[in-house]
Amino acid sequence: MPILQNSVRIVSNRRLAQDHYRLRLERPRSFPEIEAGQFVQLRLEEGWDPFLPRPLCLYEHSRLWMDVVYQVVGRGTAILSKKKAGASVGVLGPLGLGFPILLDGDTYVFVAGGVGIASLYLAAKELVRQVKGRARFILLFGLKSVGMLHCHQDFRELGFELRIATDDGSYGKKGYVTGLVEQLFEKEQLGRVWVYACGPRPMFLALTGILPRFGQDAYLSLDEHMACGVGVCLGCAVKTVRGNGDPYRLVCKEGPVFKMSEIDWESKK
């Protein structure tokens, strides 16, 4: 059951890279257990502008604190980036259904586009905790340029192999992360593979053209516009390929994690 905390204290708000920040919040004692891939709705406390809260994925947590990683993309996140330790924000969470922790893989491939890497870390950490030494872990990370590189070292410390692509070629391979995906599946023997991914819509659309060629599905954390976060406003509905009844599912309540094969991607193009 999500909990509304009207005033949660900021512990730190640290810049990680160009336009990317890691926000640490004091974790209230009443805050429920957090699952990998869940998010919170965060509301700035001053006034009503911006009116809507911001959905931010939970990156890491302890008994005393919880972190989110966010990118400055508009007025709300720009204001948030200037918040100092000791200030307060409103938090509703934890929300949504997260990633399944599947323990029978030979290789775990994590595909991240931009700030989408933040949604994957808790699943990565839990999988490594449970199957390290029995499986291979690979992070394929795509971003615009080296100035936006962030969070990858946390995956390296978990024991992940890192392969990075930048749009402008300033770090790693020049091009999109989906090129790394295609190269990996074409050239390497991976055994039983589980794919976890989070990124922008074009990345997902590209994955739908690559992974099925290798008989591969994926678990995706979708990024949709959310207003309420609890399934009331219906603003985050996504069309699925359900054969019976209503094909629409709510990303905030029935996601944000879905199997790639569940989504009606023709409706998303």
Image (spheres, rainbow, N blue to C red):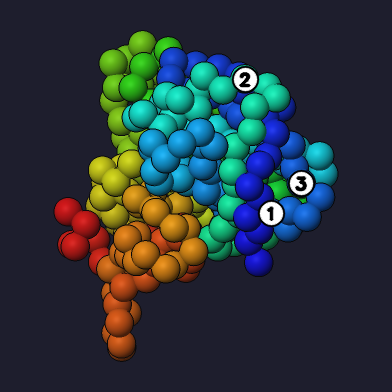
Residue marked by disc 1: 34
Q: CA distance from mark 3 to mark 2?
A: 19 Å
Whether pointer 3 and pointer 2 mark residues with C-beta atoms closer than 8 Å, the reply is no
Quadrant in which the N terminus appears? bottom right
The answer to whether one can see residue 210 in this image is no
Label 2 environment density (alpha carbons within 10 Å; few <14, some 14–19, many ≥20): some
Residue 196 coordinates in the image, percent (x, y)? 50, 50
Query: In the rendered structure, which amino acid carries the disc numbered 1?
Result: Ile
Residue located 42% across and 68% down the image: 232
Q: Earlier in the sequence, mark 2 or mark 1?
A: 1
Instruction: Classify residue 113 by image quadrant.
Output: top left
Instruction: For label 1, count other residues whose C-alpha is less than 10 Å away and answer few (under 14), some (14-19) or many (20+).
Output: some
Where is residue 50? Give x, y as percent.
Answer: 38, 37
Residue that extends furthest to the bottom in the rendered view of this protein: 244
Image: 72 above or below 109:
above
Residue at mark 2 to residue at mark 1: CA–CA distance? 25 Å
The residue under the point 41% across, 32% down is 76
Quickly name the residue at label 2: 84
Marks 3 and 1, Cα distance to the nearest angstrom? Answer: 13 Å
Instruction: Tell me whether the residue at label 3 lies in contact with that at label 1, contact meaning CB atoms closer than 8 angstroms.
Output: no
Nearer to the camera, 230 or 104: 230
Q: Which residue sits at x=19%, y=62%?
A: 267
Name the element at disc 2. loop
Out of 3 and 71, give the one closest to the viewer.
3
Mark 3 — residue? Answer: 28
Which quarter of the picture shows residue 14? top right
Q: Is residue 4 above or below residue 44?
A: below
Residue 229 in view (yes/no): yes
Name above or below for residue 161 compared with residue 205. above
Tell which tag, 2 or 1, sits nearer the viewer.
2
